Image (cartoon, grey):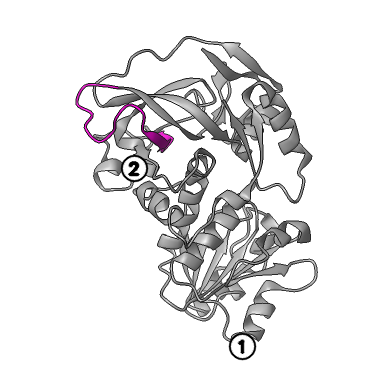
Amino acid sequence: MRALVLQEKGRMGIEDVPSPGAPGPGEVRIAMHTVGICASDVHYWTEGRIGPFVVEAPMILGHEGAGTVVEIGEGVTGLSVGDRVAMEPGVPDPASRATLEGRYNVDPAVRFWATPPIDGCLAEEVVHPAAFTYRLPDALSFAEGALIEPFAVGMFAATKAQISPGDVVAVIGSGTIGIMTALAARAGGASRVYISDVQSAKLGLLDGLTGIIPVDATQEDLGERVRAETSGWGPQVVIEASGAAPAYKGLWTVPAPGGRVVLVGMPVEPVAFDVATAQSRGISIETIFRYANIHQKAIDLAASDAVDLGRFVTETFAFEDSEKAFERFLEGRPTDVKLQIAF
């Protein structure tokens, strides 16, 4: 079969690779249809590593996928041949303590697509555990199915934020994850979601979304804007989704007293933490690493009238043009949200 293989830093291409073969017990074989490009895929291509994860051997890229079940293994009862599905890309050790405690996203032994040395899903077929494969309802396209993975990050962030009905939420960063988080926060009960970015063109993509308020960070301060519109109080929840070090400088003064900060973006280098300010204002802090037990909820919400994921698919490239899709990502066009590849 064909797959997009990263041979080493700076060198990738479509190659013939061995088929994954028949599914084993509890597994399904899936013909891939649509795969989204994530910044991590591009980073492995340009840098050859992300933190401790280093590309030391050829690896198939891609972890945001949707496709069709073409074969089921022994013991699989919840899926059938022909089902359109989205896949959760991280498979933990079922016997690990993290998994048994319900935190399988932090299982040290998790096998996550396109994280060295694990192959990803930018291939014509994959074999995957049925337990981490989810049927797509008719209301969702393959493109929307491939967006479930980043939407799950936003859903997990909104869940850990413990948003209560009527809360005001502020999101820093309107990249794909920032937008997905804003959608989840709004659908989760926030009365208003303010979302800031330094690229006004990207914020323009949010026009027309009720209750989501863009804030141009080059023109006004997010905290000041929200305080001005909440009688000086501020947002109950602040979600940092940019991963930009400068965002941390005044982060702890943005939420309302007793509010919550949820850290989603990952800074490249350590950042300063103003402990005294956070303590004196009673700020609680949550961190996000991927997601756990959230994909089905993400699919159900995406299939409802509360969320429209499809509007954030910017362009779809043919599989044969995969390298062009990655090159387009590197251009950093401000109006690009999600670029996808379709077989």
Residue at 46 percent across and 65 percent down: it is 187
Asked if residue 90 lies left or right of residue 25, the reply is right
- Other residues around mark 1 within 10 Å, as few (<14) / some (14–19) / many (≥20): few
Q: Which of 234/96 is in front?
A: 234
Q: Amino acid at mark 2?
A: Tyr
The residue beneath circle 1 is 232
User: Which of the 4 quarters of the picture holds residue 193?
Assistant: bottom right
- Give the percent coordinates (x, y) of residue 42: 66, 33
Residue at 58 percent across and 80 percent down: it is 234
- Give the percent coordinates (x, y) of residue 275: 54, 68
Q: Amino acid at mark 1?
A: Gly
Query: How many numbered callouts?
Result: 2
Residue at 60 percent across and 66 percent down: it is 209
- Give the percent coordinates (x, y) of residue 252: 58, 71
Q: Which of 235/131 is in front?
A: 131
Placement of 293 over or under 55, stated as above or below: below
Q: Which residues are magenta?
A: 72-90
Q: Can I make out residue 265 in this image?
A: no
Task: Identify the mark nearer the N-term, 1 or 2.
Answer: 2
Residue at 71 percent across and 23 percent down: it is 10
- Other residues around mark 2 within 10 Å, as few (<14) / some (14–19) / many (≥20): many
Placement of 75 over or under 139, stated as above or below: above
The residue beneath circle 2 is 104
Q: How far apart, in angstroms, are the residues tagged by discs 1 and 2?
A: 40 Å
Q: Is residue 82 in the magenta section?
A: yes
Placement of 45 over or under 14, stated as above or below: below
Task: Name the outermost residue toward the front.
Answer: 138
Asked if residue 275 lies left or right of residue 110, the reply is right
Q: Secondary structure at mark 1?
A: loop
